Amino acid sequence: MTRHAIIPLSLLLLLLAGCQEAPAPAEAAPAIATLSPVERGQYLVDVGGCHDCHTPWTMQENGPGPDLTRALSGHPADLEMPDPPAPVGPWIVASAATNTAHAGPWGVSFTANLTPHDETGLGTWTTETFIATIRNGRHMGRGRPLLPPMPYFNYAKATDEDLAAIFAYLQTVPAIDNRVPSPRPPRLAQAQ
Amino acid sequence: MRPSPTAPTPATAPAPLRPPPLRAAFALYVCGAALVLGSLTACRPEVTAPVRAPGAPKPPPERLEDTGLARAALLSFSPQYPLWTDGADKRRWIALPPGTSIDASDPDDWRFPPGTRLWKEFSFGGRPVETRYMEARSDGSWSYATYVHGEDGVARRAPDRGVPEGVPVAGGAGRHVIPGQADCVSCHEGRPSPVLGFSLLQLSGDRDPNAPHAAFGPEDVSVAALVRTGRLRRLPPTLVAPRVEASSPTERAALGYLHGNCGGCHNDVGPLAPLGMVLAQSFGRPRPVQGTLLARESRFRLWDRPDAVHRVHAGEPERSVLLHRLRSRDPNTQMPPVGSLVADEEAAALLERWIRDLPGGRLVGLHN
């Protein structure tokens, strides 16, 4: 039933998208082969949509947009989330306005701080740890499972070189001290 | 102009892409689809198995019987601090190639000769359910496989993804999860030697009488026996029968349990070393300069226990994140993160006693 529910949503969005003016032509794509690992990593972070969830979104002049003063710092620690709304019919997921907290059958997940902050981000991680995380779908490659909506299973298909480039770029962004909350279990598990 | 979703970067960075007007909505849609699909697969979507490249190592045999379990010259062994697997009974064997030996010059991470094979059989209610297998390749890497025992008596190799939904068993949680290849690697390759149960402290002849769930059979080998028969070489003579340094029997058993169940990942020589949380006992190197548990803030915070801040809070088990995670079976919280669906209450009670008795500062065995 949930599969069926998502299809009309996708059609609706596609139809809406078709009504929009065509976006301005993107600037010329960079010549990938000439990029440094950090530049390549930035390119992959941009096209991979990492900011969509790992940078808090705010309502801006033209609608929602990422707050780049907190780029890639994950769910804001000072934004305490109340219990999510109960699912109704086919509506089984809920997302915070920041797009950094997501509730669903898995519980509540909060997007991680990807900045190189030593205590709250990836400051002490290594390239190997990062690659293992994406490959295995587990925190630091061997801990708790990564949760939706993190599509690690797509990124797991990237090459080691690409993943290393992403990590190299993430290590260059400003470190932000932001301790993201740990995930919460599903409602049923909480009630037990 | 809208801000581009790009963090500040060096001046040479490429120009960012401009998001289309409905990018936010589309992003939410994509996320939603991933969420639904994720939930339908127990939040663990299967990653398409890569095509095996030409020249890649040969996979383990399809059937357990073809691994040589029935033919090899086997040594049976039982680690004194066994890994908890929901109360499963276990049998373990190792086979070394003829004429070879294990190099113990690093007492904490023995080096095994190519061709070394190990098996671990899991049984519930007297019925074998699974046998795990690992083999040392000639290039120094290891291959891993899990075999599921069928009703027809044949144990067949599980798919690379394992059997995450589990197989039915009589006992434990009523089902037993078969680990996938990634699980094997995540546990076994957390330190230089991937062989965890066949190691110095685990096979010490000075066995801990208070170790939870320990069993020792008359055929099981010890470090002393391995040295005597020439299967283990270059081990300093003073280390033939090591024990956990502790101030009480409870502390000895608690630290030993953490070594056997957590030290494979939480050590100071593997990928998680940057965490600075060392639960592995070491006999070849100076121990960590600082205690890594007591009064050390945990990076993980429990959603329902904001007062639990430290890994171990001396005297207050209820404020110790380590104990909460050991007891939890919420997959986002539990430790170890794989291999168990039922908390080890006997061990949790042991650790609770140990934490409650800690004198609030000194932790023998993890301090210098």
Image (spheres, rainbow, N blue to C red):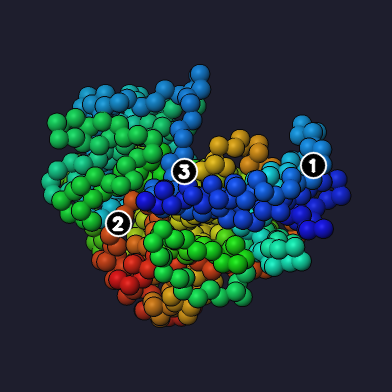
The image shows residue A57 at horizontal and vertical percentages of 67, 64
Up/down of B181 relative to A108, above or below: above
* Cα–Cα span, label 2 and label 1: 52 Å
| Residue situated furthest top in the rendering | B54
| Label 2, residues with CA under 10 Å away: few <14, some 14-19, many ≥20 | many
Which of the chains bears the disc numbered 3?
B
Q: Is residue B119 left or right of residue A151?
A: left
Which of the chains bears the disc numbered 1?
A
Q: Which mark is residue A25?
A: 1
Q: In the image, which is nearer the foreground, mark 3 or mark 1?
A: 1
The image shows residue B260 at horizontal and vertical percentages of 36, 54
Nearest to N terminus: mark 3 or mark 2: 3
Tell me the amino acid under the disc marked 3.
Answer: Glu
Near-viewer residue (B299 or A26):
A26
The secondary element bearing badge 3 is classed as: loop
Q: Which mark is residue B189?
A: 3
Tell me the amino acid under the disc marked 1.
Answer: Pro
Q: Which mark is residue B309?
A: none
The residue indicated by pointer 2 is B341
Which of the chains bears the disc numbered 2?
B
